[in-house]
Amino acid sequence: GPGAGPGRGRRSLGRWPGPGRAPISDAPPRPRSKHVLTEDIVHREVTPDQKLLSRRLLTKTNRMPRWAERFFPANVAHSVYILEDSIVDPQNQTMTTFTWNINHARLMVVEERCVYCVNPENSGWTEVQREAWISSSLFGISRAVQEFGLARFKSNVTKSTKGFEYALARIQGEAPSKTLVETAKQATEKAKETALAATEKAKDLASKAATKKQQYM
Amino acid sequence: MNSVGEACTELKREYDQCFNRWFAEKFLKGESAGDPCVQLFKRYQLCVQKAIKEKDIPIEGLEFMGPSKGKAENSS
C-alpha cells in the first residue's frame, strides 16, 4: 500500500572476516538490542553456487506509544515476529539481508534491506548500504477519512444551497411587492454564514429570477 | 539468546556453536564441502518447528527474500 521510503544510509562497520583473519564470534551479525526476546534459525541451506541462505525468526517486545495502545488495543499483548532472510556470498564477499515483520502487519510493515560488502576504497572495511520501507494501511485510512470528509462537506454545501433556493422561492411567493434587490440582499447575508459556493449560487439565482419576473410583466 | 521454544534453547546453542565454527573456519574460506552440523540442525529444527506451530507463528508459505523482490535495487 502507500507508504514512505526508501530511506537510505551508508556507513562503514568493522572488518570483513576474510581468510586468515580471526573470525568475529557472531557471524552473520546478531542483534544486540535488549528488546529481542528470542532468536532462531528456521531455514538454512548452501546453494550449488556456494551461497549460504538463512532465515532467522526473531521475537521482539512490542513497544507502542501510549496513544497507540488506546487505538490498537488488540496489538498490545502480542510480541512482534520478525523474519530476517540472508544470503552470504563469500566469493564476492557480500552479504544481503532482508528483514520484515510478519505480524502487526495491518498496523505497519517495516522492511529493511542491507547489503554488506567490502569497501572498494579500503578493502579492510565492511560497508553497509541500508534501505528501509515503511508502509501502513493507516495511510489508506487517513486518505479515506479525508475523502469522506470532503464528500460530506460537498453534500452539506449542496443541502444548504438547496435550502437557500427553497427559502428564496418562498420569500418571492409570499411577498411579491418586495424588490428582488432587497430579496437578494437578505439571501446574501444568510449565505455568508455558509460556504462561499452558496453565496455564488445566490447571486446566480437572483439574476435568473430577475429575468423571469420581467417575462411575467 | 533464547529460542522461541523454551525447551529448544539448549539444542539451539549446540547447533549454533557447531555452525559458527564451520562458518568461520570452512565456509568463509571457500571450503563448504561436508556440513558437520546436519544432525544437530535436525534435532533443533524438530523442536523449534513444533514450538512455532504451537504458538501459531505465521512463517508458512513465505518466499525467501520474497517481499524484497518488488523493491527496486538501489542505484548508486
Image (tube, coloured by chain):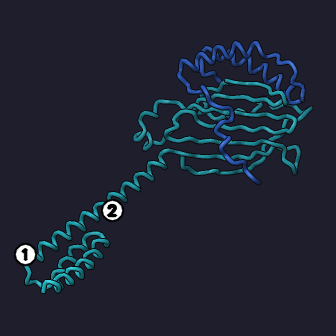
Chain colours: A cyan, B blue
Up-down relation of residue A164 to residue A153 (above or below): below
Q: Position of residue B46 (x, y in %)?
A: 65, 14
- For the residue labelled by badge 1, is the local secondary structure a helix, a strand or a loop? helix
The image quadrant of residue B13 is: top right
Label annotation for residue A13? none
- For residue A36, what is the image quadrant? top right
Label 2 Cα neighbours within 10 Å, binned few <14 / some 14-19 / many ≥20: some
Q: CA distance from mark 1 to mark 2?
A: 30 Å
State left or right for residue A203 relative to residue B37: left
Q: Nearer the viewer, mark 1 or mark 2?
A: 1
A158 up-or-down from B26: above or below:
below
Q: Share a chain, discs 1 and 2?
A: yes
Q: In this orientation, which residue lies closer to the viewer: A11 or B75?
A: B75
What residue is disc 2 on? A154
| Amino acid type indicated by mark 2 | Lys
Q: Residue at x 25, y 68 (%)?
A: A161
The image's mark for residue A174 is 1
